[in-house]
Image (tube, rainbow, N blue to C red):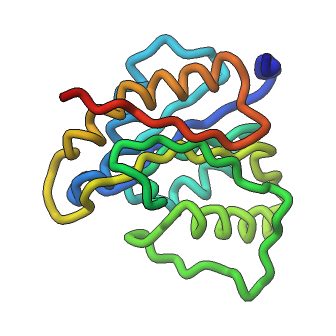
């Protein structure tokens, strides 16, 4: 069993994505539904949308754990959920400094920007960073999630809720949401 989060820790769950690009809105919708749950007091859920720069600056306020929720294309069936643990120890060189483009702020770019901001301010980045991703079916211009991604949202909420209550896994895990037929 994974250890429970320490009572003094702060956790930020950030739903990221663009609701005008179909399944890219997965993180935003999942954060919206998760925020409706009774969560532990150390957990804050935010809908970041496409405001990745805002999220990077918010993280300077000090969080022990960051959970990014986003559409994540990894080549599996649409609706497949992933938990990916980011290697916090992997540093960024000055040549890795990201361009500040709020419309193209991917999780990798966000984490690189956070590293630069922390180095410049002396702030500490989160000790643990997870990405809860969902394989998209389509990120074409349209509002609304595809059926497999929409069906994966409640499973993603349960998965994140379990991670928040039971502690985060020490190894990345992959979960597949079953699409209803």
Q: Left of 40 or right of it: where is 168?
A: right
Residue at x 75% of width, y 40% of height: 171
In the picture as drawn, the residue positioned furthest to the bottom comes out as: 95
For the point 54% across and 53% down, which residue is it? 55
Residue 62 in view here:
no
User: Farthest residue toward the left?
Assistant: 142
The number of numbered discs placed on residues in the rendered structure image is 0
Q: Position of residue 76 (x, y in %)?
A: 43, 54
Q: Could you say which quadrant of the image residue 167 lies in?
A: top right
Quarter occupied by the N terminus = top right
Q: Compared to 49, does 73 lie above or below? A: below
Front residue of this view, candidates 172 and 16: 172
Position in image of residue 173 (x %, y %): 64, 39
Return the x and y of residue 13 as percentages of the image width and height.
Answer: 55, 37
Task: Indicate the position of residue 59 as horizontal and vertical percent values.
Answer: 65, 49
Q: Nearer the viewer, residue 21 or 150?
A: 150
- Pick the residue in front: 67 or 63: 67
């Amino acid at each position: 069993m994974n250890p429970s989060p320490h009572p003094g820790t702060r956790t930020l769950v950030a739903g990221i994505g663009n609701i005008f690009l179909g399944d890219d809105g997965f993180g935003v919708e999942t954060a919206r539904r998760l925020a409706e749950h009774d969560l532990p007091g150390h957990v804050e859920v935010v809908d970041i949308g496409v405001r990745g720069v805002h999220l990077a600056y918010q993280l300077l306020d000090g969080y022990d754990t960051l959970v990014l929720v986003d559409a994540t294309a990894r080549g599996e069936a649409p609706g497949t959920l992933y938990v990916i643990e980011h290697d916090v120890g992997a540093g960024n060189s000055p040549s890795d400094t990201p361009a500040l483009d709020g419309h193209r702020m991917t999780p990798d770019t966000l984490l690189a920007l956070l590293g630069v901001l922390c180095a410049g301010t002396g702030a500490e980045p989160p000790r643990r960073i997870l990405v809860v991703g969902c394989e998209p079916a389509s990120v074409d211009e349209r509002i609304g999630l595809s059926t497999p991604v929409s069906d994966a949202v409640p499973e993603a909420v349960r998965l994140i809720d379990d991670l928040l209550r039971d502690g985060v896994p020490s190894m990345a895990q992959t979960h597949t949401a079953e699409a209803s037929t």
